[in-house]
Image (spheres, rainbow, N blue to C red):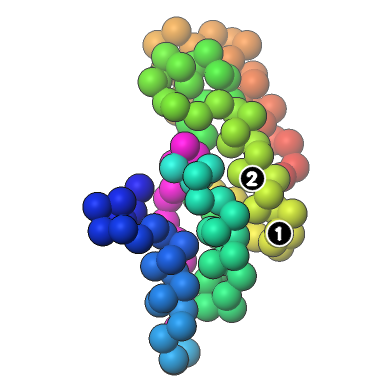
Amino acid sequence: QYGLDKGINLPALLERITAIPGDFRLRVGMMNPTSTLGILDELLQAYSSEKVYKVLHLPIQSASDKVLEKMRRKHTMEQANFIVEKFRDTFPESTLFTDIIVGFPGEDEEDFELTLDWILSPR
């Protein structure tokens, strides 16, 4: 979570950078779902700048809440889907990147299929 120790968050930083005059573009790197939830509305506002590429890199890692819990991830798929849907609703032509882990200890065929279905479904 960028800036917690400095009293600033990522959306505020983006707004400060995009206010700088000049011809440049920013691409935000990976953001974990848990941290993104708390700043989502501000983040969408900051992304509205023409200087920010409409790219979301959100590592869901698995579409199975059971596997996410075993991985000790703090987000659920409901939360991840909410973020993706809000981003897509706001920026329909955006690009979505994610990271997936398969074969995690305890993952079964059903868990794998949930993840595969998520990957293959239109976003």
Tell me: residue 66, above or below residue 74: above
Q: Residues within 10 Å of mark 2 (few under 14, many from 20)?
A: some
**Label 1 SS:** helix
**Residue type at the position of mark 2:** Val
The residue carrying mark 1 is 90
Who's the residue at 57% across and 19% down the image? 64
Q: How many marks?
A: 2
Residue 102, position as x, y percentages in the image: 47, 23
Please, is residue 70 above or below residue 122 in the view? Answer: above
Residue depicted at 41% across the width and 59% down the height: 10
Q: Nearer the viewer, residue 110 or 90?
A: 90
Q: Horizontal and vertical percent for residue 69?
A: 46, 17
Q: Amino acid at mark 1?
A: Thr
Q: Earlier in the sequence, mark 2 or mark 1?
A: 2
Q: Residue at x 42, y 50 (%)?
A: 30
Residue sitting nearer the eye, 67 or 8: 8
61 or 34: nearer the eye? Answer: 34
Q: Is residue 26 magenta?
A: yes
Residue 107 screen position, x and y as percent? 49, 12
Q: Nearer the viewer, residue 13 or 83?
A: 13
What residue does disc 2 label?
84
On residue 112, the disc is: none
- Seen in the image, is 122 located left or right of residue 49? right
Q: Which residues are magenta?
A: 24-34
- The answer to whether residue 92 shows anywhere in this view is yes
On whether residue 45 falls in the magenta region, the answer is: no
| Residue for point 61% across, 44% down | 83
Label 2 – label 1 distance at C-alpha: 10 Å
Q: Main secondary structure of the magenta part?
A: loop
Label 2: element kind:
helix
Query: x and y percent of residue 4 in the render?
Result: 30, 51
